[in-house]
Image (spheres, rainbow, N blue to C red):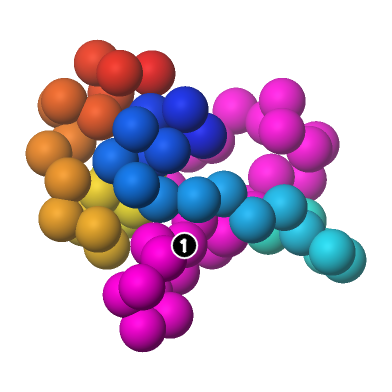
Amino acid sequence: MEAAAKKRGVDLIKPRKGSHYKFSEPGSGGKTYPVPAHNGIRTDISDMYVRGLCRCFGWDYDQFKADL
Protein backbone atom coordinates (compact mmCIF):
# COMPACT_ATOMS: atom_id res chain seq x y z
CA MET A 1 0.00 0.00 0.00
CA GLU A 2 2.86 2.35 0.74
CA ALA A 3 4.24 2.18 -2.82
CA ALA A 4 0.79 2.59 -4.41
CA ALA A 5 0.06 5.63 -2.21
CA LYS A 6 3.50 7.15 -2.80
CA LYS A 7 2.89 6.81 -6.55
CA ARG A 8 -0.12 9.11 -5.98
CA GLY A 9 1.83 11.64 -3.92
CA VAL A 10 0.71 10.50 -0.47
CA ASP A 11 3.21 9.71 2.29
CA LEU A 12 2.99 6.97 4.92
CA ILE A 13 3.72 8.13 8.46
CA LYS A 14 4.76 5.32 10.80
CA PRO A 15 3.29 5.37 14.31
CA ARG A 16 5.38 6.88 17.10
CA LYS A 17 3.20 5.07 19.59
CA GLY A 18 0.14 2.94 19.07
CA SER A 19 -0.57 0.93 15.96
CA HIS A 20 -2.11 3.34 13.45
CA TYR A 21 -0.11 4.23 10.37
CA LYS A 22 -1.23 7.48 8.75
CA PHE A 23 -1.42 8.25 5.07
CA SER A 24 -0.91 11.98 4.58
CA GLU A 25 -1.09 14.21 1.52
CA PRO A 26 1.56 16.95 1.71
CA GLY A 27 0.21 20.44 1.15
CA SER A 28 -3.42 19.41 1.61
CA GLY A 29 -3.93 21.27 4.85
CA GLY A 30 -3.54 18.17 6.99
CA LYS A 31 -5.63 15.59 5.12
CA THR A 32 -4.73 12.23 6.70
CA TYR A 33 -6.24 8.76 6.86
CA PRO A 34 -5.31 6.41 9.74
CA VAL A 35 -4.98 2.67 9.11
CA PRO A 36 -4.60 0.21 12.00
CA ALA A 37 -1.71 -2.20 11.61
CA HIS A 38 -1.43 -4.08 14.89
CA ASN A 39 1.29 -6.42 13.58
CA GLY A 40 3.36 -3.71 11.98
CA ILE A 41 3.78 -3.19 8.27
CA ARG A 42 3.10 -6.89 7.56
CA THR A 43 -0.51 -6.64 8.75
CA ASP A 44 -3.25 -7.64 6.30
CA ILE A 45 -5.30 -4.48 5.89
CA SER A 46 -9.07 -4.92 5.68
CA ASP A 47 -10.73 -4.03 2.38
CA MET A 48 -12.87 -1.58 4.36
CA TYR A 49 -9.76 0.52 5.12
CA VAL A 50 -8.48 0.33 1.55
CA ARG A 51 -11.84 1.61 0.26
CA GLY A 52 -11.85 4.36 2.90
CA LEU A 53 -8.33 5.41 1.93
CA CYS A 54 -9.40 5.66 -1.72
CA ARG A 55 -12.49 7.69 -0.79
CA CYS A 56 -10.47 10.04 1.41
CA PHE A 57 -8.03 10.95 -1.35
CA GLY A 58 -10.40 10.62 -4.33
CA TRP A 59 -8.70 7.61 -5.92
CA ASP A 60 -10.29 4.93 -8.06
CA TYR A 61 -10.47 1.81 -5.88
CA ASP A 62 -9.99 -0.70 -8.71
CA GLN A 63 -6.94 1.13 -10.05
CA PHE A 64 -5.43 1.36 -6.56
CA LYS A 65 -5.98 -2.38 -5.98
CA ALA A 66 -4.33 -3.12 -9.34
CA ASP A 67 -1.24 -1.21 -8.19
CA LEU A 68 -0.87 -3.27 -4.99
Which quarter of the rendering shows the C terminus? top left
Q: Where does the image place residue 65, in percent across and percent down from the top left?
A: 28, 23
Which residue corresponds to the image point at 51% horizontal and 34% vertical from the top-left?
Answer: 2
Where disc 1 sits, the SS reads: strand
- Decide: is 31 above or below 37: below
Which residue corresponds to the image point at 46% horizontal and 62% vertical from the top-left?
Answer: 24
Residue furthest to the front: 27
> Is residue 32 covered in magenta?
yes
Note whether residue 47 is visible: no
Q: Where does the image place residue 37, in percent across and percent down from the top left?
A: 69, 45
- Decide: is 67 above or below 62: above
Q: Nearer the viewer, residue 1 or 9?
A: 9
In this figure, what is the number of numbered marks?
A: 1
Q: Is residue 24 left or right of residue 60?
A: right
Q: Is residue 60 left or right of residue 67?
A: left
**Pointer 1 residue:** 24
Note whether residue 59 is visible: yes
Q: Residues within 10 Å of mark 1 (few under 14, many from 20)?
A: many
Q: Is residue 7 left or right of residue 19?
A: left
Which residue corresponds to the image point at 40% horizontal and 50% vertical from the top-left?
Answer: 10
Q: Nearer the viewer, residue 33 or 26?
A: 26
Q: Tell me which corner region of the image, top left, top right, bottom left or bottom right, holds residue 15.
A: bottom right
Q: Where does the image place residue 22, in percent across and percent down from the top left?
A: 57, 59
Amino acid at circle 1: Ser
- Decide: is 20 above or below 62: below
Residue furthest to the bottom: 29
The magenta region covers 21-49
> Is residue 37 covered in magenta?
yes
Which residue corresponds to the image point at 41% horizontal and 65% vertical from the top-left?
Answer: 26
